[in-house]
Amino acid sequence: MATQAAQAPAGFGALEGRSEWSLVWERLRRKKLAMISLVVIIVIYGAGLFASVLAPYSYTEQNLDRGLEGISADHWLGTDRLGRDLLSRAMYSARTTLIITAAVVLSGSLLLGNGLGLLAGYRGGWVDNAIMRVGEVFSSLPGLLMLILINASLSPRVVDAVRSIEENTPLTGLVSSGFASYITVFLALSLFFWVGTARIIRAQVLQLREREFIMAAEALGASQRRVIIRHVLPNISFLVVLQISATLGSVAGSELVLSWFGVGIQPPAPSFGAMLFEGSGARTFQAHPNLLLVPGVAITMLLLGFALLGDALNDAIAGR
Amino acid sequence: MTAYIIRRLLWLPIILVIVTFFTFAIARFGPGDPLLVVAGQIRDDEVLEQIRADRGLDGNVFEQYQTWLFDAVRGDFGESIQQQGFTVTEILLPKMWISAQLGIIAIITIFGLGIPLGLLAARANGTWVDPFVISTLLFLQAIPVLVVIPPLLWLFATQLDWLPVGGWDGLFDIWWIGGVIAVPIPDPHLYIPLVAFTLPGFAGVARLTRITALEVQKEDYVRTARAKGLSEGRVTFRHVLPNSLLPLVTVIGFALAGVLEGAFFVETLLGIPGIGRFVFQAVGSRDYDVILATTAIFATAFVVMNLVIDIVYGFIDPRIRVGASR
């Protein structure tokens, strides 16, 4: 901050009126890698978001006469075993990744993680104890094995539930679109992704509680809600954003692995994990490397983008 | 400190009970009845009931769990459904041994290469080497193992024909020089799994080493060491390195977790008969006793590991005495 003021003494007056977030953004913008990562993330997520408009084909459109083709004018990235366009499938897979990461980060990390972390840190006592002990149980479960087990056990039940929704409401096509598997993956991942966030938030809130301004607010008779909203939340907002950026990558990675094992997103719904699985034999890779490389490069760029952006964000928030 | 350790140890069995009950309930909640497999051709309800009773799978979930728990406490983890006639312990122990060997070698490699790389980056701070090393490692960390293995296999097994496609043949081969001198060399089956296990791990260790080393380099005692006229190498290895190692103790747990998780796909993709591959098959065939035993082992490993790390941390750095602050 000091260097910035020194560089631009004229802007010093304006500095006071700017939020901390705009300062962070200012620092972030000067980092080349961070900006490239941001663009990569936006491109991949954008491709997912607008897949139904942008994709040249549907993800289910087969052409058995033209299976396992290489790069051509019709199919820019080639086709898979069933003659489905790989570019289109990759874009729809990006949509799956977008849905799952957004949903899990929103519920598991943002709502559950922050909510429970705040509650534990602020209330303390038995509430804190209970939440942290439950978290301890979750973090000592072997995560991946549990996720596979939960998905394998839960998915038939969720399919039944979705089918009964379909029968009792005017909604149709839910089961055939693979909607149920999205719900299953979302529930299972949310169950595991709150613990890390809750711990970090709790630790921060515990420290904040000892600070004078919080005590002052409490002594002045501010309600708990007011203290949390006006005094605690603004002071953990940086941490919340950092946690989101850290969680995004690992959620995307977990979805990939689950779908690869066949217990995640169910076909015909497209996912990078299922695409990777189809291309992962050594012989398959020799004959048709695009089957593996198309989803592989896309997901690697996305994960790398999250990692680099998170890093740069960390630096920018720390004032570097 | 002692009170803290005792409290944590008392907590261990409670966690294990919760974890295994949770696993048991979820596994039972799933579709399919593995006992139909055990019964084979016989579709007699009476026989089926008999098998169910023999295996302690009659009654409600709580009664079933109670049966399992009481047997498990006495060291009887039940009988596998996939491989009938074998107890879970008989099957799991050799598989665990294979996975453990691979895992230990992987963790040694991660730290053995990650620490020097981190030191190198810290020493080269301010030049292009530092960001280059770190971003390369980050890149390696970002590639999912599932994406790395097929090209590796294609290159080294199919094209170059240097390494086997998969399987397991122990850690070491013995080379006889002139039929007299035995030289142990790493088994060729080891390389591809090792690369797959370690590539995602280097970045974490190297970055942590780098950050700590950068802090330590600013310390007064390092300046003193330089002022004394010590060589750069001696400063690095005698003064910077030992003081940079401390926070690494905390990431051993993460590294272990990473290796355990990696075991699922590495072993499955490369046909290594370890515990990861077997458990995945067990989930598929609802082999309850195998799933439960493995979860219990993994959970114990996690909890004990975290406890050991906390204690070791307290010993290495007396400034952090966990017990005192709690």
Image (cartoon, grey):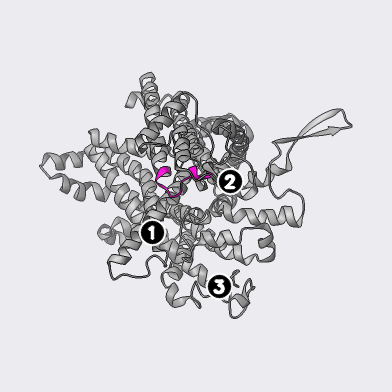
Q: Are marks 1 and 2 in contact (CB under 8 Å)?
A: no
Query: What's the distance in space between the residues labelled 1 and 3, CA to CA?
Result: 26 Å
Residues A221 and B43: in front is B43
Residues B9 and B167: in front is B167
Residue wearing tag 1: A159
Residue wearing tag 2: B124
Packing grade of label 2 (10 A; few <14, some 14-19, many >=20) is: some
Q: Tell me if residue B248 comes above or below residue B125 in the rendering.
A: above
Q: Tell me if residue A90 comes above or below residue B48 in the rendering.
A: below
Residue wearing tag 3: A84
Packing grade of label 1 (10 A; few <14, some 14-19, many >=20) is: many
> Is residue A115 in view from this perspective?
yes
**Marks 1/3 same chain:** yes
Q: Secondary structure at mark 3?
A: loop
Q: Which residues are magenta?
A: B28-37
Q: Secondary structure at mark 2?
A: loop
**Marks 3/2 same chain:** no
Q: Residue at left 27%, top 41%? A: A205
Q: Determine the chain carrying the residue at label 2.
A: B
Task: Kindly identify the amino acid type of the residue bearing the numbered disc 3.
Answer: Arg
> Between tags 1 and 3, which lies in front?
1
Residues B302 and B243: in front is B302
Is B36 contained in the magenta span?
yes
Q: Residue at left 70%, top 50%? A: B165
Query: What's the distance in space between the residues labelled 3 and 2, CA to CA?
Result: 49 Å
